[in-house]
Image (tube, grey):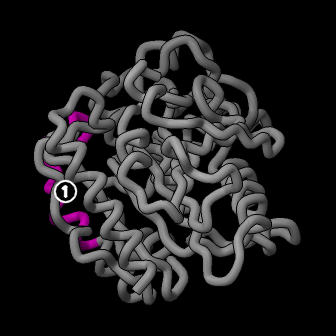
Amino acid sequence: MTGDQASFHRVGFHYIPPISAFELTQPGCRENPATNILLWIGGLFDTFGLVSYPFAISHTLPANWSLVQLILSSSGNSWGTTTLDHDVAEISNAVRYFRKYQQGDAKIVIMGHSTGCQDALHYVSAPRLDSEDRDRPRVDGIILQAPVSDREALVDSLEPHDLNKGNVIAQQYIHEGRPDDCLPNSVTQPVYRNIGVTARRWLSLSSPDGKGQDDMFSSDLTDEQLGRSFGSIPRGTAVLFLCGGKDEYVPKHVDPEAFMQRWKQFAEQAGAVMHPDSTKLLDGATHNLNGDPQPVVDELSKRVNSFLDMLST
């Protein structure tokens, strides 16, 4: 966190085992959690303060909204040994925690950044598979900022031989009943540095058969696949896409505006309420906006606030 960020915000801490939740409030705000909560979830390797724009957003929110950054057990360098289902279970606990402090029609929105978009979309669209998950509390909306394909990023980052080698080893581990064993460092280090990545999570991200749990934003997904994600968003859920015009992780062959339009089509067919800016690129925005010109960050904050206003009408 920079000195400027720290000087303009108070940071309230909530411990929701095993989650750490940091509530960003402006000086002078009351002690109790805000009426409405924007839960922010980062991407791979992200932890508190590594992405700066949440501080900018929180500084512009109305007094009855707070931005809360969730640090899940998968945050930082721990994402390689967990799953989206595990993340969703932890997010559910956070939603329940903040609901305890809310009254009436108070809102909770999940905002995902990068791979955090998978968490946000999985939260609202994944089937409830067991008795505990059937109690997953509903949220009022989701914001997907920088939703990109981890599979296509791997294709761009690794030589075909190296990617195939990783897939073969991971599939062998699965066949041997070892889904939670980590792949050799020689396989994962070139792209994921020195962290452990299980066979299960590698295949979820690399998705060689197109069935990886994390594979939600690839450019070649079928209508059936999009129907299981965007097409399964609960009716009435508000949705906003925020894709950057200079996102360095979007493959050159991909037209993000065309894909936002396709995602929007499936979401609307399911009954989601789309924000009107959801098919407009955020001009000049890189993947996480760190170091981007202030007008770009201001436009991001403006769209987020417009989305939250939409929930109140």
Q: How far across and how far down the image is residue 71, in percent? A: 64, 37
- The magenta-colored residue range is 248-262
- Asked if residue 171 shows in the view, the reply is no
Vertical position of residue 296 compared to residue 310: above or below: above
How many marks are shown on the rendered structure?
1
Q: How far across and how far down the image is residue 119, in percent? A: 56, 53
Vertical position of residue 4 compared to residue 39: above or below: above
Which residue is located at x 14 percent, y 56 percent? 255
Front residue of this view, candidates 290 and 249: 290
Vertical position of residue 127 compared to residue 252: above or below: below
Which residue is tagged 1? Answer: 256
Front residue of this view, candidates 103 and 48: 103
Q: How far across and how far down the image is residue 129, in percent? A: 77, 69
Relative placement, left or right, of 57 versus 169 is: left
Which residue is located at x 56 percent, y 36 percent? 10
Residue occupying the far right of the picture: 131
**Badge 1: residue crowd in 10 Å (few <14, some 14–19, many ≥20):** many
Which residue is located at x 23 percent, y 27 percent? 291
Label 1 is placed on what type of residue?
Pro
- Asked if residue 132 shows in the view, the reply is yes
Instruction: Tell whether position 192 is magenta.
Output: no
Which residue is located at x 83 percent, y 42 percent? 17
Relative placement, left or right, of 101 versus 244 is: right
Q: How far across and how far down the image is residue 33, in percent? A: 67, 56
Callout 1 secondary element: helix
Residue occupying the far front of the picture: 28
